[in-house]
Image (cartoon, coloured by chain):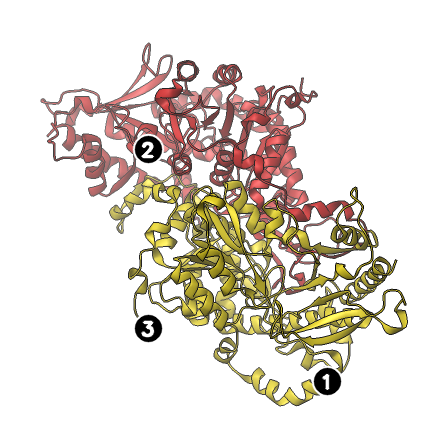
Chain colours: A red, B yellow
Amino acid sequence: MSSEKLTKAIDLQHHLSESSRTRETSPLKGLQKFMRPGVTVLAGGLPSPAYFPFSNIGGQALVPESFPINAAESSSSSMSWLWNMFGSSSKKEKTQTINIPKYPNTPGELSLSTVLQYTPSVANPQLQKIMYEFSTKVFKPAYSDYTTLVHTGNTDGWNRIVVTLCNKGEAILASEWTYPSALHTVIPYGNTIASVAIDSQGMRADSLRDVLQNWDEKARGAPRPHLAYIVPIGQNPTGATMGLARKKEIYDVCVEFDVIICEDDPYYFLQEGKYIPPAERKRVAKQTALVKKAAAAEDSEHFIANLEQSFLKIDYQGRVIRMDTYSKTVAPGARLGWFTCNPMFAERLERQGETTTQAPCGFGQSLVTQLMLDWKYEGYIRWLRALGSQYEVRRDFLIDSLTEEFDMQANYAHTGIWQGTEYYSATPKAHLMSEKYGNKTMFSFVPPTAGMFVWLKVHLENCPRTVREDEEPLEIQLWAAVAEAGVLLGPGWIFSTNTVSGGPLFSEHGHFRIAFSDAQPEVMKSGMKTFAKVMREFFEQ
Amino acid sequence: MSSEKLTKAIDLQHHLSESSRTRETSPLKGLQKFMRPGVTVLAGGLPSPAYFPFSNIGGQALVPESFPINAAESSSSSMSWLWNMFGSSSKKEKTQTINIPKYPNTPGELSLSTVLQYTPSVANPQLQKIMYEFSTKVFKPAYSDYTTLVHTGNTDGWNRIVVTLCNKGEAILASEWTYPSALHTVIPYGNTIASVAIDSQGMRADSLRDVLQNWDEKARGAPRPHLAYIVPIGQNPTGATMGLARKKEIYDVCVEFDVIICEDDPYYFLQEGKYIPPAERKRVAKQTALVKKAAAAEDSEHFIANLEQSFLKIDYQGRVIRMDTYSKTVAPGARLGWFTCNPMFAERLERQGETTTQAPCGFGQSLVTQLMLDWKYEGYIRWLRALGSQYEVRRDFLIDSLTEEFDMQANYAHTGIWQGTEYYSATPKAHLMSEKYGNKTMFSFVPPTAGMFVWLKVHLENCPRTVREDEEPLEIQLWAAVAEAGVLLGPGWIFSTNTVSGGPLFSEHGHFRIAFSDAQPEVMKSGMKTFAKVMREFFEQ
């Protein structure tokens, strides 16, 4: 199947916005046909590279093997590793030298004189190749004429997608809890959000079908949506990860109702596996030691095969625009990522880039490109394997810290939105339990298998407080109490597509997003201690 | 005057677009008030800097004195300097080492761990300070509460201005010949161009008043424009430079009709002075040698004082949004520049940045910032002084090359669009003149005093060719003939605001834009030889 050019089979053109249809190619591009060796170009208006004030740039890059493949495993004999790993360790890092000269001696090498010049709004050729090969090898699109196109980070990428595909007033499908910046991009253009219910795997296919099937154009003041925004792995804020079966269900609904999918996947390589409670971890670790050892020895192909798969894998109609970014795998400041999508959308997205960001920063492009060239594909995959493992340890540490402060019970959900999933519910520690409050659940959560966040559902229905009319809702009061005590959690309501659209809070529960991605372990630990203290005071007043 | 906060005196709020009014601050910004030393932040979602794969970045930067202050002067005894200067000289450049560590030892130093992290959509504090001080010292705004805000290059900056100030369907004032990318940004948003006539100083104040005063809302299908796009120095494509008196006239019209001015000024530091023909150059050079010597010794304050001044200098109402860029003074690939404007617009422009580019690339930001920190203000000014001088030599070389191929006559325009200006008209060399064609003018131009371009007006009315219905217009035929002969010039019609709006060519003349910014001298020379040959064949058929 993957050798067929399937994007020609369906009509994608009608998805383009009015503005995108009228967006023209830069007129100087018309001159390309006159370009041939030896032609004299006085048409440009480029500054001379002689005046670029750098002879070369570069730096010391970590080697791909800087972190172990199985972080927890390789150092489980002591806790000291953790403190070393998290900190700005003063131990000597093993590095390799990155260098990009203005005028390289070898043709074909990355050259500052080129990459710092005005360039088309695509990446330098080396990076183009890296991105294309990466998407091919890792995501294995289901059709053959897909394209990759550089952008300056997924936030800019999403903005370009909205401008390219949506007219003013149209509604966009998004999960009931979503990355707020994605929503704040949309609202000022006069677009609205069509909220879709989620469960432990993120967006629900039945809810998506429901929204589309029962769309009331008159009541909603907009035609049926034709664009869905989905963060499928380690979703922000809920941490939910969508398996391939769910993706297929979602995709089928999108085929039926002719919806384009934006797969915004920044956390793809932060796949952390199942959370094992500390009491069982050692036993499980022992049991799986041999398996893990074997896994560590596996090549990149096996590693890739064991990751959740992208929508691209099942996109036989070219209706997925996938966004990848170096923000979580290199650094957010790289402001560098890429689309993988059908060539027609890619061409329009490129035009949109020409009149906004143009090509991404040449300094960043060249440093990241040279890093990838020096590391090679296998080196970068090695880096990514270790990265997922690092975040696994962080995730475990945060949940362990919560478990130390509460009585934590693993439950299997037979009904409700977590049906078929294991979740944890937290009650006060037995010796701290007040008679009045008893052992009612304070919060519950599904341990994430990917990403940076634990998403707590706070059971405010078990809180005896009443709210006066002049007071903020309980959720906000509780958040503020934790903040006053010195711990800032992600406030749930800012992620609600309902709140962003100007409506009331979506849920009677409170929600907090806790990030385990960057805090030092002692900070997470003391933060959870403080959180527990405030929770008890708040629920047991 | 400059101590007064004058932006409060007039109402700027009503200029904001609908979309800009509804654009919200990122909700996480609301958490700022809870930030205090020692607070535990688990609200973010930042990757750990431990995983940024660079221990440090840096490079070898040219020293500020790399090029002479008076390039032509300091080496006028021989031509060899020119070939050295233009080329990718293999002579040892004098450089200084730039270094940005991930974790600097000294507090307050630029740190990769910070600049490569997610940051607010403003620059790092050091760069913010550099930009603000630069605008203050160089442009001396007429009111005190102006703000500077980083952007990712003037193209992105202009896009942000349009989205922030214009509703769909509104018209934007622009010169009859304008940078096409600025127009192609505007058109897809459903905006149109209100074309304003130019002369040798760029946009004409009387034409601007005319357009505004006689604006027919019904006929134009849009309210009277409230935004003007102006490239005041070395305008693209005409090379025109606007003096302060003209700026005052334009500004007064804008006050009267409540128009916001976008001052897009990428060529500001490529101010080259008056073109002196080669025959006189030596004599003039001798006469002014002492003056120039004195000028060379002058400090940066004198240099700044002798430059054309910015609209900011006379902007007593805060209605100017100035855009500066490092594209022409460092490198286009830096994708880095800044707005200087009133704080209310700056706040809205910042919000617009949050949902698109976010902060500019941290690799580029840190390298440019460290360069500026190491060079210091005086060093950067020294660099800019030399840069203008370099482009002066390039400008002279191109016009000299034209002069070698044609009989060139300096004329003083008593009437017409060049009234009060010296311009050159070109006729065939006497010994190459055909009897049939005689010595009629083939093209004319005003030698630019700034920028990168010579803008030729081609006198097609003197060309005996007739155009069949199935043929392209003469201008396009001529351009293609030059291109077929191996020389690509900037085709005039792509810069016409009339053409871009879908209308016919604005002028009965043809126009070509010739860039002298980056070609090697021998290439410019042979290019002009070829151009002359094709011109003769075309006009003397």
Q: Of residues A458 and B404, which is closer to you in this image?
A: B404
Q: Of residues B467 and A177, which is closer to you in this image?
A: B467
* Residue designated by label 1: B282
In which quadrant of the rendered image does the C terminus of chain A lie? top left
* Residue designated by label 2: A500
**In the image, what residue occupies the spot 84% across and 54% down?**
B485
The x and y percentages for residue B349 are: 41, 50
| Vertical placement of residue B32 versus B418, above or below | above
Q: Chain of mark 2?
A: A
Q: Report how far apart the C-alphas of labels 1 and 2 lie in the structure.
A: 70 Å
Label placed on residue B1: 3
Q: Report how far apart the C-alphas of labels 1 and 3 lie in the structure.
A: 44 Å
Relative side of A241 to A39, left or right: left
Q: Say if mark 1 contacts mark 2, CB within 8 Å.
A: no
Relative side of B417 to B81, left or right: left
The x and y percentages for residue A467 are: 12, 29
What is the three-letter code of the residue carrying label 1? Lys
Q: Report how far apart the C-alphas of labels 2 and 3 lie in the structure.
A: 44 Å
Q: Chain of mark 1?
A: B
Give the foreground label among 2 and 3. Answer: 3
* Secondary structure found at label 3: loop
Give the foreground label among 1 and 2. Answer: 1
Rendered image quadrant of residue A384: top right
Q: Chain of mark 3?
A: B
Does label 2 lie on the same chain as label 1? no
Q: Say if mark 2 contacts mark 3, CB within 8 Å.
A: no
Relative side of B439 to B396, left or right: right
Is residue A539 at least partly visible in the picture?
yes
| Vertical placement of residue B234 versus B76, above or below | above
